Each structure stands twice: as C-alpha cells, then as structure tokens.
Amino acid sequence: MSEPSTRRVALEILARVEDDGAYANLAASAALGRSDLDERDRRLVTDLVYGTLRRRRSLDHLVDRFLVAPPPPAARRALRLGTYQLVERPDIPDHAAVDETVAATPKRFKGLVNAVLRKVAAAEVEYPDTATQLSYPDWIVDTLRNDLGDDEAMGALASMNEPAARIERADGYVQDPASQAVVDLVGARPGELVVDLCAAPGGKATGMAAGGATVIAVDLAPARVGLITTNVAKLGATGVFPVLADGTRAPLRPGCADRVLVDAPCSGLGVLRRRADARWRIDDAAPSRLARVQVDLLDAAAELLVPGGLLVYSVCTLTAAESVGVDEELASRRPELIAEPAPGDPWISRGRGAVLLPQQIGSDGMWLFRYRLDPADGRARDRYDLGHPTSGATR
C-alpha cells in the first residue's frame, strides 16, 4: 500500500482517540484490522499514532509558533502527525514527512498544513520548559519530581517517552518485565491457594498458576472478568478460576489463602510508555483518590490470609500517595502484617517497599510491598474444596 495510506490510517486512529474518546490501543487495533497494510506499514502506523499522542504538548508548541489562531481539530491532528515525523523520526526525510502528511490531510486543510510543516522543518527545535519538552502535564512532572527527586523523575519521564518493548513469556503471553517480576515475587508454590483480587486481564493470574498453584482471579466488571476468561482459554491455562466480585467484598472465607496479590487500580503513571494517551486522561486528584481504594483492597486482602500467609501489593505507578502513603495507612490498620525484606537489584528499596523505575531495565514503573501475616494470628485455616471448578469458583 502506498505511503500516504499509512498517514491516513494514523489520522483516522487519532480522530477516534481525540474526537470520540476512544482508547488508543483499541482504536489502533480496530483500524489496523480493517486495513491491508503489511507488517512494516502497520509498525509505522503504530509508532506514528503512539508517538504523536505521547508528544502532543511538545508538538503543539513547535506548531503554534507559526499559527495566528487555533486550527480545526482535523488540521491540528495533521500538524501534530507531520511535526512528530520531522522532529522525532530522523529516519524519515523531511520532504517525505511533509508531502505524505499533506497528501493524507483533508483537502480544505492541505494548504495550511503544507505551509506550517515547511516552517517547522526549517526552524530550530526549542522548548520553554521541561514539561513542554518532555510533553507531560505540569502536575505529572511536579508530582514525580517531588516524590522521586529530580534525577529519578526526569529519567522516568524520558524513559516513558520511548516505545514499549514487546516481551513474550514462554507460554506466548505478552507481559511487561515488571509484571513478570511481580509474579515471581509472589512466589506461588504448587498446591497453594492464591487470590488475585484485581486480576484482569489475567496475565499475573495465569503466570502464578503456571507453577502449579490454584488461583482465584477476582475482578469487578463483567467485561474484565471476560478478559480473564478469554486469556485463560487462549493460553490453555489450568488452575485459574475467574470470579466476578468487588475485591473489597470477595465471596471467600477468611483465612483461606496462602497468598494474596493486590495489583491495585492506580493512576498508571508508571505505564505511560504503553498507554500513549493516558497522560492526557489522568487528573491530578487521581493518586489520592485511588490510594483510598488501594487501602480498602489491602485491608480486605489481609482477612483472606492464613497465619503466615503472604500479601503482595503492587501498583504500576510512581507516586508516593499510592505507595509509601498506602503502606503507612495499612501499617496503622493492620499491625499484624509484617513487612518482608525488599527484593534486590534492579528494585530500589524505599521505606518498607521497593520501586522499579522505567529507566532501569526498560520496563514499566512499579512499586511493590510484601507483607507476612503474623504466624501467631489466631484465625482458623479454612480453604475451599477446589476439586470441582464450578463449585469452587462460585462459593
């Protein structure tokens, strides 16, 4: 297919995200599924879309120097797309970036897009501040600087502007190294009962079950439980039992689980490389709002543990509110939970937990805490009979 078609597909996806509120990964998957692009062009479209979304603020700055008024959305998309190629894709010649983008632009905006992109191509690349240069909302830059310190925050933000690597497990499931590390650190053993309280889409649940554990995979929404079921079937995984329930009120008996994983809903500020549009969707109140949910989930999770059982808390974010702040609240609520030693390199020990920064191994950013329920805790052990999946999954 000709080069202009890749830009047309990219502009179509951007329109779905920006005008209709679609998620980039879903919009891209649908549009590419309808196209007859070869693999090389599909990769190009994906990079153009994700890169343009990530770099939106910096691209707008470079474009707006040559505009006297805000352009209509369709023209703005084309200007961002062309500027991304000019500035961030040195392998694409300037003339190709301009000409092919103009060819894909709606006819009434071709003149504007052509004129502005040629000015961008000839101008110096300069930014007024760090947030604009890295293309993040001010609040994200300020929060991570405050919570991590300048050097680590800047490294994390720069790293999350790079494309995410595609990493497959031995069973073919695509999963980021940070998430694979969490599975390993849960340490589920054959014959153990593990509860995954926020399990969708099922990557960690199937990973834990692969070692012989039985995993109750809980999630709140029917569509999310459907994702778990689909992935379990696709992988041919055994020992995973999806349950539709609120993790703070899971239909499980106290003291039933050897291990509980709470991979909690969070602001997602550690996964911005793979969620290209997320930085523009998240609001500055999200970390504190979600921290309250996280504490409630952990409080409920503690009830499910056998004495001596392990509770693992992970979040794919980098904020203090959703990590050390949650841990402090949990310590006051649940003194019977004894913090386990932090894992070693590449994790960085912080307080009673550890953080994996995106720049360390090119992974998602992740916070992790592990707690052992005091073996002297007096609750009775009362596990399910999971010999029959249907009864076990619903009791």
Image (cartoon, grey):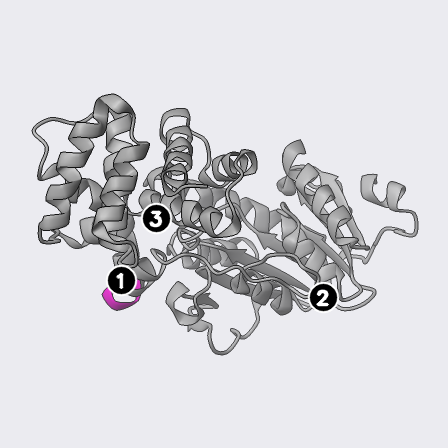
Nearer-the-camera pick, 350 or 203: 203
Q: Nearer the viewer, residue 140 or 171?
A: 171
The image quadrant of residue 179 is: bottom right
- Amino acid type at circle 2 is Ala
- Answer above or below: position of 363 versus 14: below
Q: Which residues are magenta?
A: 149-153
Number of numbered callouts drawn: 3
Q: Residue at x 10, y 32 (%)?
A: 67
Are the residues tagged 3 and 2 within 8 Å (C-beta)?
A: no
Prevailing secondary structure of the magenta residues = helix
Q: Is residue 296 magenta?
A: no
Question: Which secondary structure lies at badge 2?
Answer: loop
Q: Which numbered disc, 3 or 1, marks the residue that appears first in the sequence?
A: 3
Of labels 1 and 2, the one closer to you: 1
Q: Secondary structure at mark 1?
A: helix
- According to the picture, the residue beneath numbered tag 1 turns out to be 154
